[in-house]
């Protein structure tokens, strides 16, 4: 019973991740590949056939495999993510958000950007 419930939860996470990844294809600012990475990871725990389908997919398989094998991120994705974080930080700074939020969120995004640029290029 517990094993079946765990498998269903892994599958639900995989399906939700794929759905968010698909939305990210058409919605600027919502990344696709991180959600597909999450879907493949969740699939490896509860839906091996889905994981294999994602890995074999002609469009989505290569970035997933590059991430798994080398932790690599395409340079274009790094630039796009950095640009989106910069725009988001600028909008936040121009907003009426509390000062601690205006400081903490861009600082966190800067940490994410630094980590991202340290990843190997795909």
Image (cartoon, grey):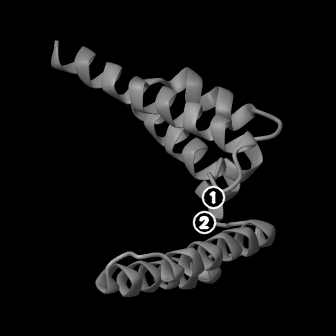
Element at badge 1? helix
How far apart in space, not on screen, are marks 1 and 2 (Cα)?
4 Å
- Identify the residue under disc 1: 67
> Which quarter of the picture shows residue 79?
bottom right
Query: Where in the figure is residue 70, as x and y percent of width and height?
Result: 64, 65
Q: Residue at x 26, y 25 (%)?
A: 6
Secondary structure at badge 2 equals loop
Indicate the quadrant containing the N terminus: top left, top right, bottom left or bottom right.
top left
Question: Which dot marks residue 102?
Answer: none
Instruction: Check if mark 1's residue and mark 2's residue have beta carbons within 8 Å.
Output: yes
Instruction: Please indicate whether residue 4 sits to the left or right of residue 66 in the image.
Output: left
- In the picture, the quarter occupied by the C terminus is bottom right
> Which residue is at the front of the view, 41 or 80?
80
Position of 107 with respect to 77 (left or right) is left
The answer to whether residue 119 is above or below residue 50 is: below
Q: Residue at 58% x, 52% y: name it.
A: 34
Residue drawn at the location 73% of the way across and 66% of the way down: 77
Q: Position of residue 54 (x, y in %)?
A: 66, 33
Quadrant of residue 102 in the image? bottom left
Residue closer to the observer: 31 or 57? 31
Residue 27 vs 93, above or below: the answer is above
Residues packed near mark 2 inside 10 Å, few (<14), some (14 to 19) or many (20 plus):
some
**Residue 23: where, in percent of width, then height?**
64, 37
**Circle 2 is placed at which residue position?**
71
Of residues 14 and 82, the one nearer the viewer is 82
Say which of 28 and 58 sits in front.
28
Q: Residues within 10 Å of mark 1 (few under 14, many from 20)?
A: some
Whether residue 85 is situated above or below residue 7 in the rendered picture: below
Residue under the point 60% across and 42% down:
36
């Amino acid at each position: 019973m517990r094993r079946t419930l765990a498998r269903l939860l892994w599958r639900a996470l995989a399906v939700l991740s794929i759905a968010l990844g698909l939305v990210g294809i058409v919605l600027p600012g919502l990344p696709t590949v991180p959600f597909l990475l999450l879907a493949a990871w969740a699939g490896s725990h509860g839906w091996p056939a889905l994981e294999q389908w994602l890995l074999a997919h002609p469009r989505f398989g290569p970035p997933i495999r590059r991430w798994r094998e080398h932790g690599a991120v395409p340079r274009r994705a790094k630039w796009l993510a950095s640009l989106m974080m910069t725009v988001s930080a600028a909008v936040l700074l121009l907003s009426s958000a509390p000062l601690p939020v205006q400081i903490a969120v861009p600082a966190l995004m800067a940490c994410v950007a630094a980590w991202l640029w340290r990843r190997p290029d795909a």
